[in-house]
Amino acid sequence: MAAHRSTGTSVAALVLAAGQGQRLGQPKATVEFAGQRLVDRCVDTVRSAGCATVVVVTGAVQPDLGAVRQVHNPDWASGMGSSLRLGLLALEDDGADAVVIVLVDQPLITSEAVARLLAAYTAGARAAVATYSGKRRNPVLLAREHWPRVREMAQGDVGARPFLTAYAHLVTPIPCDDIASPEDIDTLADLERLRATGPRGDSRPV
């Protein structure tokens, strides 16, 4: 069991924000939602939860993120897998014991959901995933010892899912139905629908 931690400062956050948003018509990172770009919203969410170190993997567009560390993925068109591999590699020398992974196109993921994963890590979980109606979605937490295997298994447009499936016995499910929603933005219709639910995601998925 991991040593007790009073905060999530030993857990880094990895924001995957490299996609072109082809069906949406613009890169998702720069889409505005509730008065913020989606990428800024993600950064604020993980910081509010207690992640002091944040790395954003960009690709199709490289927005100005101020002091936030940005890692460019030149192979972004190959899919999420390359961004996850690059992001985990960038964190190797950071000193973090674990990472929380969030996707830029899920604006109804809340800091409370991220904080639940941090609490699970503090309690000893070495891998954890938020669940909604019993289904595993995002965010995902991975202790450092799992990063090499996750990188090995992340291919194409698939991220940590192969690892979570193959090593399901190591993964702690964290129900988040009451505090977040994993709905994502792929099209303009998705964007308008989620905007209509409000920034806290008052409408929950069935």
Image (spheres, rainbow, N blue to C red):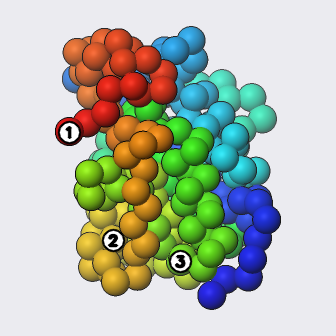
The picture quadrant where one finds residue 140 is bottom left
Res 185 quadrant in image: top left
Quickly name the residue at label 1: 206
Pointers 2 and 1 in contact (CB under 8 A)? no
Q: Earlier in the sequence, mark 2 or mark 3?
A: 3
206 or 2: nearer the viewer: 206
Residue at disc 3, secondary structure: loop
Q: Earlier in the sequence, mark 3 or mark 1?
A: 3
Q: Which residue is mark 2?
A: 164
Residue 129 placement (x, y as % from top left): 42, 62
- Distance between the Cα atoms at labels 2 and 1? 23 Å
Question: How much space separates mark 2 and mark 3, taking CA atoms?
Answer: 12 Å
Q: What type is the residue that disc 2 sits on?
A: Leu
Q: Real-space Cα distance between discs 3 and 1?
A: 29 Å
Q: In the rendered image, which quarter is residue 171 located in?
A: bottom left
Mark 3 surroundings: few (<14), some (14-19) or many (≥20) residues within 10 A: many
The residue indicated by pointer 3 is: 126
For this view, does 3 lie left or right of residue 198? right
Amino acid type at image mark 3: Arg
Q: Residue at x 51, y 63 (%)?
A: 141
Q: Secondary structure at mark 2?
A: helix
Residue at (46% x, 67% y) in the render = 128
Residue under the point 60% across and 79% down: 124
- Residue furthest toward the bottom? 1
Q: Position of residue 98 (x, y in %)?
A: 62, 68
Residue 84 coordinates in the image, percent (x, y): 45, 57
